[in-house]
Amino acid sequence: MKHRWWVLMLLGLLMGLFFYFDLGRFISLEMLKKQHEALQQAYHAQPVWFIACYAATYIVMAGLSLPGALIMTLAGGAIFGLWVGLPVVLISATIGATLALWVARYVLRDAVQRRFGDRLEPINQGLERDGAFYLLTLRVAPVLPFFLLNLLMALTTIRSTTFFWASLVGMLAGTAVYVNAGTQLATIHHPSDILSPTLMVSLFLLAFFPWLARWGIELIKTRRLYARWTKPRQFDRNLVVIGAGAAGLVSAYVAAATRAKVTLIESHKMGGDCLNVGCVPSKALIRSANFLKQIQNVAALGFAQASIDYDFAAVMARVQRVIKTVEPHDSAARYTQLGVEVLQGTARITSPWSVEVNGQTLTTRAIVIATGARPLVPDIPGLERVPHYTSDTIWSLTARPQQLIVLGGGPIGCELAQAFARLGCQVTQVVRGDCLPREDEDAVMLVKAALQADGINLLTQTEALRCETENGMHALIIRGKDTGEIRLPLDALLCAVGRVPRTEGFGLEALGIPISSKHAIETNAWLQTIYPNIVACGDVAGPYQFTHIAAHQAWYASVNALFGELRRFKVDYSVIPWTTFTEPEVARVGLSENDAKARGVAYEVTRFNLADLDRAIADEAAHGFVKVLTVPGKDRILGVCIVSAHASDLLAEFVLAMKHGLGLNKILGTIHTYPTWSEANKYAAAEWRRAHVPQWLLQWVEKYHARKRGREYQ
């Protein structure tokens, strides 16, 4: 930081000297005309030395963002002529601009990224993808002064090499115009004489040529892709949706609501993973497990004792009953009533406009792929010889496993480990790294403490090596970070180490649709694949594997598939909430502290501890916190993490605030019912406000009150 200040002071000194001694008077149109012949004579006498001095002067002026670049460009044409002047000026200007980029980047970028990193993130992503095109456009069309453009680019993450060659190419046309004008120096009375309206329009058209060329290339590539296939003259349907999980159901619903003819194809069960093996059954199990935990802690509520008998099989039967109760919401009958044709069978895409199912070929204008994800089964030697389950198959249990090992420390692993522990299983949780790796340490510590309080043997930084079976007894062999091999006996092994998108068996390979390194279908910002009329959404597309994000994406997928020729919509990922349903729950939206540090985003932390919340005290649940990250000195919310009972419900207010640009002051000014858990949000806002009341105002108010009491302030 000290070095940056020295550089900044040196730059300020050089600029100050330039203006103090009015050195700009030597770089003016009048001076150039007066000294034209003398400069040409000096050039012809020692051409190499003169070009070197000229280039060095130009580079320094451009690097320091000093005025006079236009006159220097005219001088290049007037002294060297067009064919020598153009390369000399162009290369000098590009080197000078790159030097200005480096200087500004060294002095300013880190500070700007720390303070405004979240706002610059979309810009940085756009420049990473299309930086050369943006810069070419701005260089060719002189909308922004070049010194200002250099400064703005320095504050982003555009690469220096990209900046250099895009500047070199982008400045070619404009530089040629001015250098050529310099060869006719006698006819120029003012720099504005050079740019006629016709020339300005030509430069603007030239600026957009790279974008038009790129669009044309993409259009040709797309047409070549489609040329492999025979397009039907007419179509049976407007949309075919493959997969009836959250993403597929919403896609079909939107299509039917807009009076499109839509077919929904599901190979297994309507409702997908969330209804049948994911969100619904897991939350039903957690509810039963939490009730059992409450019975065990009745002393805290003033009861001497309480006991309960329960049947594990009955608890699992209740889980299935809950699924059956919710099932009609996602049933084929309901969607048929809504106007959706529902087909049971395995779909295969046979061309960009046709899908085969049950021996029938359906022609369609567009296709939505919403095939979801499946649990990842780790490659552990001997796993097939022990009773092992995934989050999809664990619901088939009817007898309680006495010794359960859970592999994985993500949300699914933590939720199910705690639930089964509360139902009386001896649970060992084996985690390769640490629990909940996407959350901040303060949240993770509370969850780990809760897991261990429920009797879970939590082993982090531990690797599963192999499974063994001897004399009908099963075991998992593990190795910790600081330990040798340890043998863990087991009755059941639950694999909860992640989920992999389902991309196999749908014909994607034949169409050449790319799959990413994370096994998801590659899509653009509009969820389109390389075929614009084939879109993907939900877990199969990523980047988030949440039911609510799948439903969110589905609106964009279906609208873009149906109306993309008229208007397309980029998916909005600006405010993404999620919750881990352990006890306490961990609910988050926006940036975490880890995220902010990794991205270089400056932030302040405001925390309200739930030990001070009246309703939490009354409910015997006064533990956890509300943590809010804000822009330094402002109430704009960057992110929120809530660790508590009802955290998932409390988060909604912050999600709404972030989505609509409301700050903490607005939350503070909103009436919250007393006594409720939602008051925690208001108290967190109050903590922020208390920390940001101006001290001068408090001192003035104190004096005011003292005078009102009739004595002078002391």
Image (spheres, grey):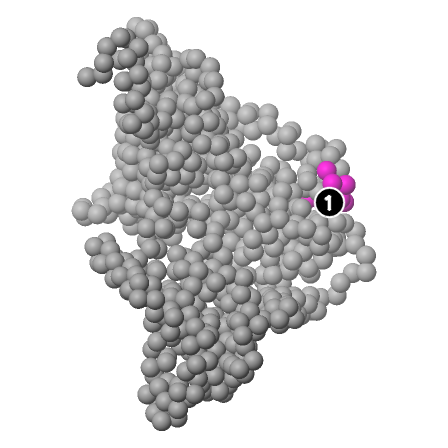
The quadrant in which residue 194 appears is bottom right
Placement of the C terminus among the 4 image quadrants: top left
Kind of residue indicated by mark 1: Val
| Of 63 and 488, the residue lying toward us | 63
Rendering coords of residue 388 (x, y %): 40, 41
- At x 47% / y 51%, what residue is drawn? 122
How many C-alpha atoms fall within 10 Å of the one at disc 1: few (<14), some, or many (≥20)? many
Numbered range of the magenta stretch: 257-266
Tell me if residue 261 is in the magenta stretch.
yes
Give the left or right position of residue 353, taking residue 124 as reference. Answer: right
The quadrant in which residue 173 appears is bottom right
Residue beneath disc 1: 262
Tell me if residue 496 is in the magenta stretch.
no
| Of 219 and 515, the residue lying toward us | 219
Image height of 89 relative to 314, above or below: below
The answer to whether any part of residue 253 appears in the image is yes
| Of 58 and 556, the residue lying toward us | 58
Rendering coords of residue 291 (x, y %): 41, 18
Name the secondary structure under disc 1: strand
